[in-house]
Image: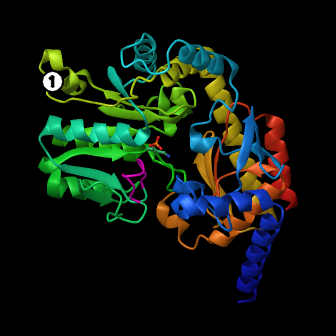
Amino acid sequence: MQRRADLDQAVFDARADYARQRPSSKRWSERARRVLPGGNTRSVLHFEPFPLRVERAEAKYLWDVDGHRYVDLLGNYTAGLLGHSPRPVLDAARAALEGGMSLGAMNENEVLLAELLVDRFPSIEQVRFTNSGTEANLMALAVATHHTGRSKIVVFHHGYHGGVLTFAVGDRDPVTVPHDWLVVDYNDVAQVTGAFGNYGHEIACVLVEPMLGSGGCIPARPEFLGALRDLCTHHGSLLVFDEVMTSRLSTGGAQRLVGTTPDLTTLGKYLGGGLSFGAFGGRRDVMAHFDGPAGGRLSHAGTFNNNVASMAAGVAALTTILTEEVLADVNARGERLRQRLNETFRARGEPMCVSGTGSLMNIHGVAGPVERYSDLAGDDDRQRELFFFDALEAGFYIARRGFIALSVEITDADVDEFVGFVADR
Ligand code: PMP
């Protein structure tokens, strides 16, 4: 009881300290609330008592309007893999914009970017671009239901596939689009096998993240993804990997690491060089539904699908920065960070742990290990909130929920400093 009261008081004090040090952010938030419901236009960025407001960013740093500098360990929820000022990408995007901002016509870079993605991802024979990962998933589901002539879609509790494809609160989130969902537990082969046993001939596809990302960075067990592959093949359903987050785990995404090839893959985030981006692609016979001249019946619209800035930035990112070595390096650094954080939490006897894969991870308010969502039962959000405010105070920006996505700008020295901060809290 005493511990509970102490934690409540500690959170109260941390919020008060945070607010006291950020009068300009507070004023902006008050102004924002008059015209933006909740004071924001991207819900995940809100936290109590009010979010900090960023004035500018460069390389690995962010500065808020109150003059604080932070090492950015959030990397815009994975879209910021390249850091804030990747020179070749900025130059390419600027040059593209100088050559005409909004063409309403085809350009060369969309072909180059498509070729680069087809080369990299084992499952992608053909690809199309969207403005976001959400749209990419919506289109993948559309083509899967059309291709199979079926309506049911298997997804997983606490899976996240975009603003209108969220299963965080079960299968009744009011903003989620009304598909014929079958929502089952992640990493649970028996449950998904049961769903196929009951509805196999009605299932159009399985949509799955190779690591439950927003749901807490819980990696898929390799046998789970293998079982999904077998079930889909056996029942004539399509397997769709949402690699919007996990594509960074190797140049061929998580699918290359685990050796399971889906029928369709969705992408987004950093692959547009840090600008708005999404893509869906896969088997040629499935993507052929968008091939009008060859008799495909699906159309895929979008004013900004091939916008010059994202296309040029994506090409530059893939050709000048995101080599096999660079990705291996950032992911190995993430592995080391996670291991050291877990050792530190354990040594301090704190009821906290961190889960994830490579450069993607989430800090939890339970001792762990966290291998299934049910392992988060008892997660104390106050621990995560305190950690968050302590991290800001120490000059590290992470997500309020404890999410971290390293960028290529983060060095071993930054990792040492962050671990040092956790050890000395
Ligand atoms: N899928 C996954 C796995 C994601 O993590 C996200 C975004 N966090 C999306 C889809 C949606 O991407 P976007 O925000 O670009 O719509």
User: Where residue 123 sits in the image (x, y, percent)?
Assistant: 35, 26
Q: Quadrant of residue 127?
A: top left
Q: What element carries label 1?
A: loop
Along the line of sight, the residue nearer the viewer: 82 or 322 = 82
User: Where residue 343 sits in the image (x, y, percent)?
Assistant: 75, 55
Quarter of the rendering occupied by the N terminus: bottom right
Along the line of sight, the residue nearer the viewer: 239 or 187 = 239
Residue 284 against residue 45 in the figure, above or below: above
Magenta-span inclusion, residue 164: yes
Q: In which quarter of the image is residue 147?
A: top left
Q: Main secondary structure of the magenta part?
A: loop
Q: Is residue 128 visible?
A: yes
Name the side, left or right, on which 213 lies relative to 205. Answer: right
Magenta-span inclusion, residue 157: no
Q: Is residue 257 visible?
A: no
Along the line of sight, the residue nearer the viewer: 372 or 238 = 238
For mark 1, what is the residue?
Answer: 296
Specify start and end residues of the magenta stretch as a single range. 159-167
Q: In which quarter of the image is residue 55?
A: top right
Task: Inspect the image, locate mark 1, and give the three-letter code of the amino acid beneath it.
Answer: Gly
Looking at the image, which residue is at 55% across and 55% down?
44
Looking at the image, which residue is at 52% across and 24% down?
251
